[in-house]
Image: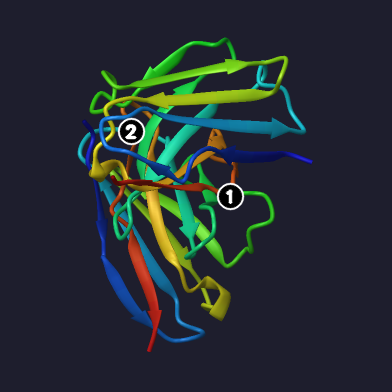
Amino acid sequence: DIQMTQSPSSMSVSLGDTVTITCRASQDVGIYVNWFQHKPGKSPRRMIYRATNLADGVPSRFSGSRSGSDYSLTISSLESEDVADYHCLQYDEYPYTFGPGTKLELK
Amino acid sequence: QVQLKESGPGLVQPSQTLSLTCTVSGFSLSSYEIIWVRQPPGKGLEWMGVIWSNGNTNYNSTLKSRLSISRDTSKSQVYLKMNSLQTEDTATYYCARFFDYWGQGVMVTVSS
């Protein structure tokens, strides 16, 4: 199975910060990486698809990038509503696999 | 608008079979894939399987021997059945339209 190694596992952040979360794929998954925001008691929300594409309705302060097998989600100028868990997902090969998640917490 | 909603029992006894239904609206199952994902309490997300628009299925190999996903396009429903449940199957179960639209999730507890 493809492993998605996600870092950091948690991050203490302040409003207005620029936050970057990274996933490294254990083998080539091309562009087939999504990023999800997940808040307690809510369903996951797709933020980025195919590594770099902003999903419908997602604020432009979110962006996705790729460098080789490293995939990053960046949140510019963090707002309070962005405090959540974030997960990456590879869907290039079965079984699709999620990263373990990054928990953003306010300082 | 696109909507998905999971339904099923909140409590299942160990060794029994879990049956969940995902009822969709606003799109056709003949045109979109439906995936199932679960999240045990305090743990990460796990992809369980997918039923494609043509009705073909793929399952997570860790669950394959216990899991079945099917559908009734006329009812706009997708079904998940998983047998031999254990306490570690306690989780919130989600269906989604290939990751872009998600149901609200249903919490399933496996306990006697």
- Residues indicated by labels 1 and 2 sit on the same polypeptide chain: no
**Of B85 and B104, the residue lying toward us:** B85
Q: Residue at x 52, y 71 (%)?
A: A82
User: How would you rate the neighbour count of disc 2 (Cα within 10 Å): few for under 14, some for 14-19, many for 20 or more?
Assistant: some
Q: Position of residue A46 (x, y in %)?
A: 54, 49
Q: Residue at x 33, y 33 (%)?
A: A29
Amino acid type, callout 1: Gln
Give residue B92's mark: none
Q: Chain of mark 2?
A: A
Q: Position of residue B97 (x, y in %)?
A: 59, 34
Q: Position of residue B67 (x, y in %)?
A: 35, 22
Is B100 drawn above or below residue B49 in the view shown?
below
B69 horizontally vs B60: left or right: right
Q: Residue at x 42, y 36 (%)?
A: A31
Is B69 drawn above or below residue A4 in the view shown?
above
Give residue A29's mark: 2
Q: Position of residue B16 (x, y in %)?
A: 32, 29
Q: Chain of mark 1?
A: B
Q: Answer with the quarter of the image where residue B108 lies.
A: top left
Q: Residue at x 49, y 40 (%)?
A: B9
* SS for dot 2: loop
Q: Which residue is situated farthest in the bottom direction here?
A: A107
A26 horizontally vs A10: left or right: left
Q: Give the residue number, with chain letter if any, for mark 1.
A: B104
Amino acid type, callout 2: Val
* SS for dot 1: loop
User: How would you rate the neighbour count of disc 1 (Cα within 10 Å): few for under 14, some for 14-19, many for 20 or more?
Assistant: many
The N terminus of chain B - image quarter: top right
